[in-house]
Image (tube, rainbow, N blue to C red):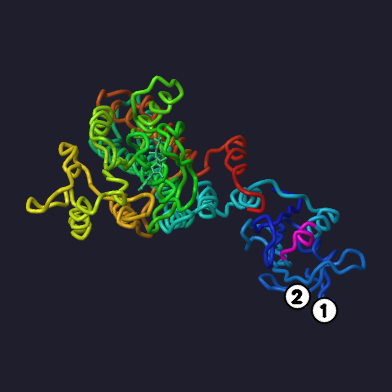
Amino acid sequence: MNEDVICAISTPPGMGAIAVVRLSGEGAIALVDTIFISPSGKKLISQQPNTVHFGRIYEGKEVIDEVLVTLFHAPHSFTGEESVEISCHGSLYIQQKILELLVSHGARLAQPGEFTRRAFLNGKFDLSQAEAVADLIASTSQVSHRVAMNQMRGGFAQKLNELREELLQFVSLVELELDFSEEDVEFADRRQLHELTKKIETDIEKLANSFKLGNAIKKGIPVAIIGETNAGKSTLLNALLNEEKAIVSDIHGTTRDAIEDTVNIGGIVFRFIDTAGIRQTSDTLENIGIERTFKKIEQASIVLWVIDLTAPEENLRKTAEALIPKLNKKQVILLFNKADLLSPEDATPMQLSLSSFPKAMTKEPAFSSTQKAHPKQHLLPELKAERLFISAKTQQNIDQLQSLLVEMAHIPQIGENDVIVTNLRHYEALKKALEAIRRVKKGLNDDLSGDFLSQDIRECMFYLGEITGQITTDEILGNIFSHFCIGK
Ligand SMILES: Nc1nc2c(ncn2[C@@H]2O[C@H](COP(=O)(O)OP(=O)(O)OP(=O)(O)O)[C@@H](O)[C@H]2O)c(=O)[nH]1
Ligand SMILES: [Mg+2]
């Protein structure tokens, strides 16, 4: 299908010990022969596939580098085409020079994702698997790696194909009936059709519902850091990220806009969002920031409410008034911050509470009635939340907070065969497929005629086919592969 030989550097931009230049397309091996000489003088074109050859790359009489060349014959390569990988030394100059030489001998620089696109077009895998390659490259945690790996190995594609098979069987029954409509026969047992629709609906629903988890795995579990101004939210963000990401100052209202970044804790990626502190203010910009804080709470899976132990109780009461109505159904951790500033008298019961972990991780306040509680410990008793004393500044108890977060993330164990949707494009298509199959269900209930049913069944199949690439347009393909890096 593709006539030209494409080439690109497939290792990350920059200098490393070695770099890999990759070529694909018919004639790739002969092309490399024009700039490569092995000690034996044998041409690469006469060598066996899947073999590696040492030799030198020349520009005219000048040696550019000593390299290893790996040969692949069609169709046994990543792209399904004749391919070559040149492992050279990682100098930027060498990498560029080899590319230049290849281009001057007839190769073309590859577009982003063009190798994977060719692999897809040559039937090496379906579209959802091709997209998983991008996810696999981008994976930053064990869980996201596993999910991408499952998808690349074809679990999702297989599930979708099973569904399409069922739909095909369904639609052929309905359409067969249409052919004999004059004779008023019923090939398709209505009850059986009902059951089949219900099963397909449940299956698609399950896939679509897995997107919330899949997205959290891929993009990070959203955790909003909220509270009154000056409570130490930005200090906490920095402590969690281990980086001076947000500006910290003792001026109230320092953070105006939400600031976010991801970090991997215990194999799970969290996306922490520092927000503008809540207070009454006439500052327009700050008020916009506070509105955003409320939006971020809505989007968050976990909310860290930072409370300044040294601030007047009145502040907290006011903040609570604004916040508590927004925290319905949210997983909340109350963080009593600036514990390092507590007087020894106050600190003693606090230490007690800290030593009573993991009890302090339960929903109950950590103090027993016989212990003297810190006066603020029992604030907000109406809020169902975890409670923890911390010092964002000295990082006291931040490790406890991290364990608590991992526990609250509720990432289930993901097995080898679990299918989890992580891609927005797939999710959108699944939602449309779901709408279509629900129309079929309703149609069956309303005793609609077969041609209406078959139209909706076919629409459902269309959207499932869009995911795997059985139905695609150049536009969709262009969109997907342009997000790949060059060389992939
Ligand atoms: N002693 C002590 N000081 C802290 C702690 N956490 C924060 N601070 C100080 O409290 C002040 C406010 O901290 P920030 O992190 O900017 O507070 P914030 O909640 O982001 O404030 P706004 O952005 O204004 O809403 C700074 O002077 C911090 O150094 C802590 O655990 N202990
Ligand atoms: Mg701040």
Mark 2: amino acid: Phe
CB of residue at label 2: within 8 Å of ligand 1? no
Q: Is residue 246 above or below residue 351?
A: above
Badges 1 and 2: C-beta atoms under 8 Å apart? yes
Q: Which residues are magenta?
A: 90-96
- Give the residue drawn at x 31%, y 46%: 337
Front one among 130 and 333: 333
Give how far apart the Cα atoms at labels 1 and 2 are: 8 Å
**Residue behind label 1 places its C-beta within 8 angstroms of ligand 1:** no
- Disc number at residue 39? 1
Q: Is residue 259 left or right of residue 481?
A: left
Number of numbered tags placed on the structure image: 2
Assign ligand 1 to one image quadrant. top left
**Label 2 Cα crowd, 10 Å radius (few <14 / some 14-19 / many 20+):** some
Quarter of the image for residue 459 reads top left
**Which mark, residue 54?**
2
The residue lying at 18 percent from left, 39 percent from top is: 379
The amino acid at mark 1 is: Pro
Q: Is residue 395 above or below residue 332?
A: below
